[in-house]
Amino acid sequence: MDKYVIRGGHPLTGTVDISGAKNAVVAILPATVLANGVCRIENIPNIADVATALEILASLGAMVRRIDRHTVEIDSRTIVTQTVPHDLAKKMRASYYFIGALLGRFGKASVPMPGGCYFGVRPIDQHLKGFSCLGAKVMPMKNGMIDAQADQLQGSSVYLDMVSVGATVNIMLAAVCAEGTTVIENAAKEPHIVDLANFLNSMGADIRGAGTDVIKIYGVERLYGTTYSIIPDQIEAGTYMAAAVATGGDVTVCNVIPKHLESITAKLQEMGAEIEEFDEEIRVSASGRLSHCNVKTMPHPGFPTDMQPQIAVLLSLAEGTSIINEGVWENRFRYVDELRRMGADIQVDGKLAVVQGIPQLTAAPVKAMDLRAGAAMVIAALAAKGVTEIEEIQYIERGYEDIVEKLQKLGAVIERVTEDDPGLQQAL
């Protein structure tokens, strides 16, 4: 079993390059199923979820060719089945995007319930509602499989009962080649929704309004191959920004879209961090004790739920009392027990957490409960006194490319080691 071993207390300094957005690429790769031609996708992050998505495409019969670590070519004209294997679907949450893509291209899809990180029940009823509105018949679930089929999808109005990134993506994928016009109301507005729309439009789709709460999709007969570059990952960028602040460092985060980071930047400034914005870079520095603040996670453009565990680490070190209100998922505080091992003073009541800041975290053995919670453990370890060991790092590597190497470049003392490695402690 591999783990991260981190000696804390070293301020991060220097520059870090941000990879392509995980949340965008896990939607765009399934979208290549819709293309009647070769898609070349660039700026792909080299992470576990991408490897799984490419395996799923290959299992369907698509021709997948890696050009380099960050570029792939996919030819979906050779797909021979519309069934996604169980063993691959359980590795990632976004495997359910293959329902919309396969339904949109072939009129049928058979996809297992997805895996990925668990923060409570995350139903896909809004996805299924969207498919039904488009004229698809969704079968009762059998053996954990979601089966949907339609002779011809028809454009329709779909009102989402709650803002859902996943449902917005899946309905977009199903609707691009449907007959007529589809209108998604109360749609998600995240940057990766816009990136998916731009990708589909580059293939010949006609999607308007992405980034607003009403998206209109004018159905087209077919989509074509394209070349497209994934946007930078706002959550990876936010994670390194938080790590810089937690360690009292000075880091320039490169290859970012500063507008995508506004809600994160605002909270870091409120806590006392200094931020300088450039065209495609943000410089983040901090010194002295942080100030307390309150955080409420919300759909974009609000503070992202995927940054909630990372900001909790900063609030644990801030002066005074802070309150975190989780407005998206009902069980995203599972990581709190791990932070308490390191001395954090956090009390959770449902979707609220009260954080009493302490001067210093202390090293302890911890584990990553999910992807973003794992990132929070890394930040806590970087700021803590002593040597921290983090287990279950496979969650972290689902969404962060070369995290060890990037942190080492910034001056962190971190190693990825095998548990029975006799040189474990000597390395640090």
Image (cartoon, helix red, strand yellow):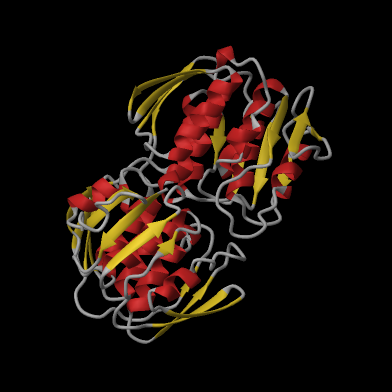
Q: Residue furthest bottom?
A: 320
When asked about the image quadrant of residue 342, the answer is bottom left
Image location (x, y in percent) of residue 288 = 20, 79
In percent of the image, x 34 and y 83: which residue is there?
358
From the viewer's perspective, tell me whether residue 128 is left or right of residue 287: right
Q: Is residue 62 above or below residue 174?
A: above
The answer to whether any part of residue 8 appears in the image is yes
Work out whether residue 391 or residue 213 is closer to the camera in this orientation and state it. Answer: 391
Work out whether residue 271 or residue 289 is closer to the camera in this orientation and state it. Answer: 289
Please state the total of marks drawn on the protein image: 0
In percent of the image, x 65 and y 22: which residue is there?
105
From the viewer's perspective, tell me whether residue 187 is left or right of residue 365: right
Work out whether residue 382 or residue 29 is closer to the camera in this orientation and state it. Answer: 382
Image location (x, y in percent) of residue 202 = 46, 26
Image location (x, y in percent) of residue 84 = 64, 29
Q: Is residue 328 above or below residue 340?
A: above
Image location (x, y in percent) of residue 141 = 80, 40
In percent of the image, x 60 and y 65: which residue is there?
331
Work out whether residue 3 or residue 354 is closer to the camera in this orientation and state it. Answer: 3
> In the rendered image, which quarter contains the C terminus?
bottom left
The answer to whether any part of residue 281 appears in the image is no
Q: Is residue 246 above or below residue 184?
A: below
Q: Residue furthest top?
A: 78
